């Protein structure tokens, strides 16, 4: 009973934070609300006895990916007003996608499970069972290629984020590594010989 109450509490927090990510006017606030989404999702994973997934969600996404994303958002200096004008025309598509997601969720929760929204207790796991080991065996056997594809996509996204931060903007003095390496001492220091002076 207590686990069910916790599930609905954190599910409500997750839904509210997800709406805040979409509706927030400040990109930094959206990123922070996305961190709250990840934390609430991690708690739900813990309630489902998937401790490894919950810990990885906090350590990897909140600790690394979201920090990188937050720095990229702050460094890009996005013009929010101009971005909102461009997104305004996509509201019909967004409503259609949201309606399809709600329909799919209701289909899973209500139509296919006649018990309604009642949560079923998980079956008792055998002694010595490790969901981390089971997940590793499935990830590196059945889903090995999709995992590699996801890793390549994340690598491309990281490189793209770095390239966006290094774009030429007026008023900046970017670092030219090749020019710095090619510098010689004779180009920077000039030695002047002066006759020795006697003290009076």
Image: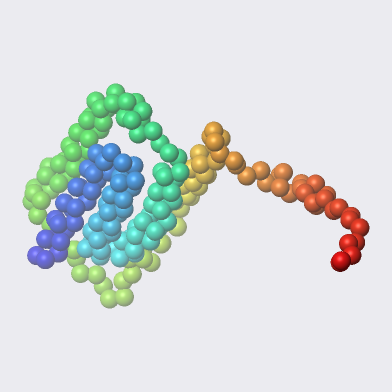
**What is the tally of numbered marks visible in this picture?**
0
Quarter holding residue 2: bottom left
Give 86 or 120, whichever is nearer the viewer. Answer: 86
* Above/below status of 135 relative to 183: below
Q: Pick out the residue farthest to the right.
A: 195
Residue 81 spot, x, y in % from top left: 33, 30
Give 129 or 186, whichever is nearer the viewer. Answer: 186
Residue 131 spot, x, y in % from top left: 33, 66
Q: Pick out the residue farthest to the front.
A: 200
Give 8 or 178, whichever is nearer the viewer. Answer: 178
Q: Is residue 63 visible?
A: yes
Task: Name the quarter where the C terminus is drawn.
Answer: bottom right
Q: Pick out the residue farthest to the top.
A: 89
Q: Is residue 74 left or right of residue 54?
A: right
Instruction: Please tell me which residue is depicted at 34% across the width and 60% down the height of the picture.
Output: 58
Task: Name the quarter where the N terminus is drawn.
Answer: bottom left
Instruction: Please tell me which residue is depicted at 14% across the width and 57% down the height of the picture.
Output: 9
Q: Is residue 109 left or right of residue 26?
A: left
Q: Is residue 12 left or right of residue 91?
A: left
Instruction: Please tell me which residue is depicted at 38% across the width and 61% down the height of the picture.
Output: 59
Q: Is residue 152 visible?
A: no
Colour logic: rainbow
Quarter holding residue 198: bottom right
Instruction: Please tell me which residue is depicted at 9% across the width and 54% down the height of the picture.
Output: 118
Residue 157 spot, x, y in % from top left: 47, 43
Q: Pick out the residue farthest to the bottom.
A: 127
Residue 36 spot, x, y in % from top left: 27, 54
* Above/below status of 187 relative to 94: below
């Amino acid at each position: 009973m207590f686990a069910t109450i916790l599930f609905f509490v954190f599910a409500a927090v997750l839904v509210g934070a997800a709406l805040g990510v979409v509706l927030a006017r400040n990109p930094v606030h959206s990123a922070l609300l996305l961190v709250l989404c990840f934390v609430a999702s991690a708690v739900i994973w813990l309630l489902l006895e998937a401790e490894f997934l919950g810990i990885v969600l906090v350590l990897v996404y909140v600790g690394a990916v979201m920090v990188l994303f937050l720095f990229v958002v702050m460094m890009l200096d996005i013009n929010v007003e101009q971005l909102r004008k461009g997104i305004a025309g996509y509201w019909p598509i967004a409503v259609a996608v949201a309606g399809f997601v709600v329909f799919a969720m209701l289909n899973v929760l209500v139509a296919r499970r006649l018990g309604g929204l009642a949560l079923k207790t998980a079956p008792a796991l055998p002694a010595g069972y490790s969901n981390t080991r089971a997940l590793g065996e499935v990830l590196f056997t059945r889903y090995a290629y999709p995992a590699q594809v996801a890793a390549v996509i994340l690598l491309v996204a990281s490189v793209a984020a770095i390239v966006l931060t290094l774009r030429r903007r007026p008023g900046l003095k970017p670092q030219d590594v090749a020019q710095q390496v090619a510098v010689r001492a004779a180009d920077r220091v000039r030695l002047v010989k002066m006759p020795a002076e006697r003290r009076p």
